[in-house]
Amino acid sequence: MVNFAPTRLLHTMLRVKNLDKSIEFYTSILGMKVLRKHDYIEGRFTLAFLGYENEQTETVIELTHNWGEHEYELGSGFGHLAFAVNDLHTLCDQLLKKNIVFTKKPAPMRFDTSEMIAFIVDPDDYLIELIEKT
């Protein structure tokens, strides 16, 4: 038996086609901050870590841009990233004005009518679930 247990989730990595466009989406649309960003010249890639709080205590998103790569297949295993929001309808009204693509407008969750959710799409077609938390 291995005597090891992770203490917390550090980050989720997403490969992105256009790093600047993705950073703009996550910062201006979802209110995250760029916590750190570094170019790896020899490896021909850039990593950007985004989050709401200190990376040492909170889970963040790692955006990976491989230079020269322009297309990725999302695969069938990945589902979505989920974000808690305070006022789903107001936020979604603002996102509609910014021409953000919705795959599901605000509505009760399919099998739990007490929880309101919506789904939007980021610049690389990753699904983002917005969950109203009151």
Image (cartoon, grey):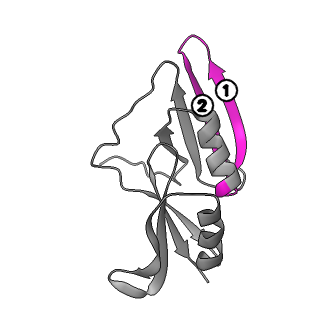
Q: Where is residue 113 in the image (x, y as percent from the top left)?
A: 40, 88
Q: Please tell me how crowded label 2 is: few (under 14), some (14-19), or many (20+) other residues with Cα within 10 Å.
A: some
The reply to whether dot 2 and dot 1 touch (C-beta < 8 Å) is: yes
Q: Residue 11 carries which label?
A: none
Could you tell me which secondary element the residue under label 1 belongs to?
Answer: strand
Could you tell me which secondary element the residue under label 2 belongs to?
Answer: strand
Residue 134 lies in the magenta stretch: no
Residue positioned 62% across, 48% down in the render: 25
Q: Position of residue 47 (x, y in %)?
A: 60, 31
- Assign the C terminus to one quadrant of the image: bottom right
Tell me the residue that label 1 is attached to: 38
From this viewpoint, which residue is outermost toward the top?
Answer: 42
Tell me the residue that label 2 is attached to: 47
Residue positioned 71% across, 43% down in the render: 34
Query: Mostly what secondary structure, the magenta segment?
Result: strand
From this viewpoint, which residue is outermost toward the left?
Answer: 76
Q: Position of residue 11 (x, y in %)?
A: 54, 47
Q: What stretch is highlighted in magenta?
A: 29-52
Three-letter amino acid code at the position of disc 1: His
Three-letter amino acid code at the position of disc 2: Leu
Residue 32 appears in the picture as rendered: no
